[in-house]
Amino acid sequence: MITLLYFAWVRERIGRDEERLALPAGVTTVTALLDHLATLSPGHAAALADRAAIRIAIDEDFVSSDAAIADAREIAIFPPVTGG
Amino acid sequence: MITLLYFAWVRERIGRDEERLALPAGVTTVTALLDHLATLSPGHAAALADRAAIRIAIDEDFVSSDAAIADAREIAIFPPVTGG
Amino acid sequence: MITTRVQAEAFDAGAEAAALAAGRSDIGAIVSFTGLVRADDGLTALTLEHYPAMTARQIAAIAAQAWARWPLLGGTVIHRHGRLLPGDPIVLVAIASANRGAAFAAAEFLMDWLKTRAPFWKQEDRGDEQRWVAAKTSDDDAAARWETP
Amino acid sequence: MITTRVQAEAFDAGAEAAALAAGRSDIGAIVSFTGLVRADDGLTALTLEHYPAMTARQIAAIAAQAWARWPLLGGTVIHRHGRLLPGDPIVLVAIASANRGAAFAAAEFLMDWLKTRAPFWKQEDRGDEQRWVAAKTSDDDAAARWETP
């Protein structure tokens, strides 16, 4: 089981800010995870349609889309940040 | 007649912060002025001995040592500034 | 050290900066940056969402990086979240050092980092219309200049 | 516009910076620099001599130059003269702008200029010993970077 967190318009499109999932065995990278999530609902699909606009953090660190998610406890998915 | 202003250690060495002088006819540049002033007293000579450490303003604008002093009303002589 | 806080409450930028030098005589320079909500194009409110655990951890990490990189004598970073109105302060970076060069550089570095790497997202209200702010390439460029050695 | 003052009195850096944004909602960034007297090597007091007429005129001129060079929305420059003690504030440059880049640049520009071109001279007291501060090449270098287009 892994905890997924969603922020900003990713959260709005998916319609929730958090969910816990058991991932299929083949899902070992961030890209594979996003592909999998996009199949879960039309909201997930809409949120993840534009991959260039998606950023990922694993256990509170930014990672790239080819990162392995092996021991991840918490994966956050969100648009590019706009703080400051 | 011209007004001369002295600041910081130039003022201290000359022993006054201001004087009014009529300049000899040949004194038309800053360099010539400093040469002339250095003859006025041992204090003036000491203050102006190291020309590399002397800065000049004519009528409240910095000038270089070859500047003409033609219409100067007020000439200030001081060390490099250390404000801020 | 650089103190970091993420909070909904307002802050007093002047008091935070002054506190860095209080009772000390080794500080020669304090640089303070305050970011404020602008009422651009009819903006009526700004809501900052964030990822609390990551924000706290990442701001502390970048503050430690600034501390290691420049000879600093103190600092405070405050980033607000929640709903803000035009004119409200959003972010404060206040840095104390012996000399101005390090204080200016560290403050700019921290701001560039906060803009591009801190997990905050701004939503703008214009009357009944809401819009998520898009990230700016110029902010990425500003942050990238600190990567070169 | 940028307000400039040369005064013996202390100033409240936080209040000066806050005043720039008071009642406005177009300002997104305030950068404030405060220079303070350091008690380096047993320094007990610092006396700032200046050339009042030239100081006022030149600070106003450089402030106008900063105003022309960057898209600023307000600013305050205060430089003190007279006798100051360790921990006392000497100089304030506070700049308001829509965005941080211009505010940081203008504040640094004004400080570099004040260090190298404003007619002030610092005398340090260490107990009974007095010494005029020598100008620093590093300040000249910092100022020179603004000359290149």
Image (cartoon, coloured by chain):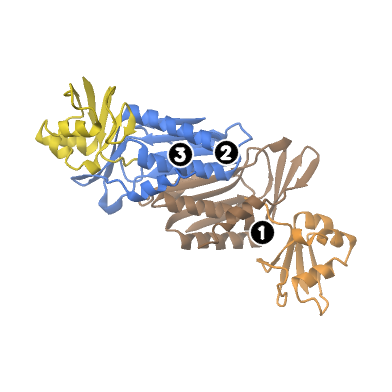
Chain colours: A yellow, B orange, C blue, D brown
Secondary structure, mark 1, is helix
State which mark lies toward you, 3 or 1: 3
The residue at the far top in this view is A1
Q: Which residue is mark 3?
A: C93
Indicate the quadrant where residue D85 lies.
Answer: top right
Indicate the quadrant where residue B21 lies.
Answer: bottom right
Q: Above or below — where is D136 with respect to A30?
A: below
Residues at discs 3 and 2 both on one chain = yes
Residues at discs 1 and 2 both on one chain = no
The front one of C136 and D36 is: C136
Query: Which residue type does callout 1 highlight?
Result: Pro
Name which residue lies at 45% across and 50% down.
D20
Which x, y percent locates residue D120?
67, 54
Quadrant where the image shows the N terminus of chain B: bottom right
Name which residue lies at 81% across and 75% down.
B23
Indicate the quadrant where residue C77 lies.
Answer: top left
Few, some or many C-alpha atoms within 10 Å of disc 1 (few <14, some 14-19, many ≥20)?
Answer: some
Which x, y percent locates residue C38?
33, 48
Contact between labelled residues 2 and 3, with CB atoms less than 8 Å apart: no
Name which residue lies at 81% across and 80% down.
B25
Q: Which residue is mark 1?
A: D52
On residue C97, the disc is 2
